[in-house]
Amino acid sequence: THATTVNRDCSSITPPYVQLIEKLGRAQELLNNRPLTLAEKILYSHLTDPEKSLANGGKIRGEVYLQLSLERVAMQDASAQMALLQFMSAGLSRTAVPSSIHCDHLIQASVGADADLQRSIESNKEVFDFLESAARKYGIEFWKPGSGIIHQIVLENYAAPGMLMLGTDSHTPNAGGLGMLAIGVGGADAVDAMTGTPWELKAPQIVGVHLTGKLNGWATPKDLILHLAGKLTVRGGTGRILEYFGPGVFSQSCTGLATVANMGAEVGATTSTFPYTPNMRAYLNATGRAPVAQAADEAAAKGFLSADEGAEYDEVIEVNLSDLEPTINGPFTPDLATPLSKFGAFVQEQGWKDEVSAALIGSCTNSSYEDMTRVAELAKQAKAAGLTTKVPFLCTPGSEQIRATMERDDVTASLEGVGAVVLANACGPCIGQWKRADKKGEENAILTSFNRNFKSRNDGNQLTMNFLASPTIVTAMAFSGKLSFDPTTDSLTTPSGESFKFSPPTGQDLPATGFTPGNIDLYPAYTPEPQPDTEVVISKDSQRLELLEPFTSPFEEGSNNPRALELPTMKVLMKVRGKCTTDHISAAGPWLKYKGHLTNISENLLITAVNDENGDINVAFDHEHDASQSTSDTIPAVAKRFKSRGQPWALVVDDNYGEGSAREHAALQPRFYGCAMILARSFARIHETNLKKQGILPLWFVDKADYARIGSGDALETTGLADLINGNQSATVALKVTKRSGEIFEIPTRHTMSSDQVKWLRAGSALNHIRSQMMS
Ligand code: SF4
């Protein structure tokens, strides 16, 4: 049986430290034994071929593409569908590295845990059946609906110091709380790892975050990352790893560090990590992994799990934890940070109603035992004063283990005693899976302990302002019902008319009597063997799952046409203005049910993106429409028209296009409709790679002002691409623009394509390339 508090066989989850340290030694020699950061040590010890990647010994970070091998892949139920559909088409009998599937995103919150879980299992049956059958066939660990949120389960079961893993979800870096590198990717990258293809990453820059002092009062690890998000902005971490160091790391719990690592995704960081600490050891021991802790102790003694003395960072940020106060971020962007002491004035300045309409705690960011016991302490204080919450107060435990332990230790009873509704151990409202009964179409403000707050993300209502805060601040606000309430200074009035002020809550980082696993039927067997005879279940007329047809290469192979290795002439479908996240490109919420059906989900392409030509949402222009059609239509409708005419097309987009998540559908969908190129002022890293995987060429404006010179219906032709495809890595690609007015000009662009990525483009997709490699 599975019992996480009992030490289990850890052989499959202990990183191979001896080999990693040996490989690191080779890398260090190639780098003339210069001092290394922790992130570099983890990356370089996972190089498939250190001699190849580090050959010139010079500047690596920000310059060199690293070919890496990984220890593990984790997938959530929404992104796993497409990853598995792609993996299946590669024709292997098992995954090359241990992999797991977690059923969490598809569970919709409505009335409470049991009923919601039952309803969601029924409504998603065909998807869960597909995932379970594919897991069985290929030997993947399958965590059933109700077992918990992917990142919480990874932290509790698989994460280990010094390890390198990929997850098909942007908050995969959560596992960095255990001193490892966990990177969020699209399903196509996961397919690389699962097929044993080296995974490629441009060596990130390393930002050192030097922590001194100690959090006190109401300040929590969440406030550290909310504060940093304000400093760094949603772009500040792009192409960079955040590596924390200094005494302030050691005063925080392992799960607290995971919260900080989790929200590194909000600043666009590749991932975040911390040196190995005694609190990590305690967490490994408490979660049944003493052998991993012991192996990590030995690796740490050899200097593997922390930065070398004198290691250089690309930038160092200083934070004195003693100075931090609670912080509230939002609305609509996670980097709009306001210290709690100024938040009331901020709300007043903006003219917002001083009302909280709902308070939500939990999610993968903040559902640790420590978070929940802190919150329960507040609930007990309030209850003793006769108070109950004034607004709906929803709690999503991160895992079955957390739920069961909360229940055993009366944490749940304390929360329910003041009016909390405990939801299923799943993502729920964090990803729009919230059947909210009120506030439809109304402006309102919610407070959450989640990590992300783009418009419409939680309840589908564009007018819901989502403010991010620590679970304790969210809980205190639930009792006041007012945005301007500051629990560190303000009092509430009890039913008997007395004044009540909360004391700062403390909480316990680990349960005194250990964790209890709860319902072990929801857990997988630890080392599943593939069962090749299993039939993978996809019904022919399914509206939710569809086998993938490979994309075709845009190039005329074998042709003598000198333009055969240039992209065919493209028409600009639309110029997107401003922020365009992966939520804008491929909305979640009700669309999540089509994750495994490319034709159906593509109906949501860019439906919340702003057209720069008229400022409208979900409008595109078709300048070559026939008499039966109108010039303007929805974006998916115009994309479909282009596809049916066989017209390749391009998008022109603004800065940081594709920020937010690893959602590969945001790349698959435009490709499905015939998009060949996206021209951006800048790209978010994960999304740019996803575009390359699906065979879309991402190009950057050299001069951002050129964005203004191109509009819908203009024709674009590449020049110089053939040179790049023929192996000239330094080839520059320019674009010839033919305006609808007939004006012609050329603009320079730049690209970030590596020599391998060029092969994907040529083959039509990375998967086409992998398949052809396997056959050759
Ligand atoms: Fe789930 Fe939200 Fe965490 Fe994503 S951020 S894994 S949706 S809980």
Image (tube, rainbow, N blue to C red):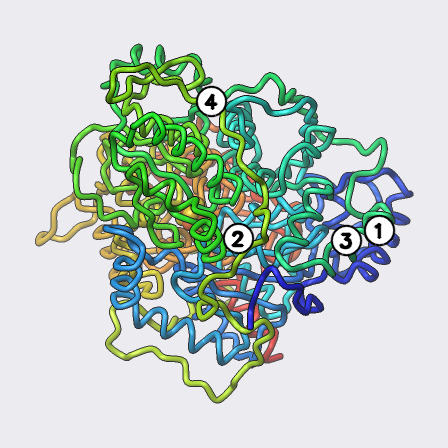
Mark 2 vs mark 3, CA separation in Å: 26 Å
Mark 3, residues whose alpha carbon is within 10 Å: few (<14), some, or many (≥20)? Answer: many
User: Label 3 near label 2: C-beta < 8 Å?
Assistant: no
User: Which residue is under mark 4?
Assistant: 503
Mark 1 vs mark 3, CA separation in Å: 20 Å
Q: Earlier in the sequence, mark 1 or mark 2?
A: 1
The image quadrant where one finds the C terminus is bottom right
Frontmost of labels 1 and 3 is 3
State the residue lying farthest toward the bottom. 533
Q: Earlier in the sequence, mark 1 or mark 3?
A: 1
Which label belongs to residue 259?
Answer: none
Frontmost of labels 4 and 3 is 4
Residue 525 left/right relative to 363:
right
The amino acid on which the numbered mark 2 sits, given as a three-letter code, is Val
Question: Dividing the picture into quarters, in which one does residue 752 lie?
Answer: top right
Residue in front for this viewpoint, 440 or 69:
440
Which label belongs to residue 27?
Answer: 1
Mark 1, residues whose alpha carbon is within 10 Å: few (<14), some, or many (≥20)? Answer: many
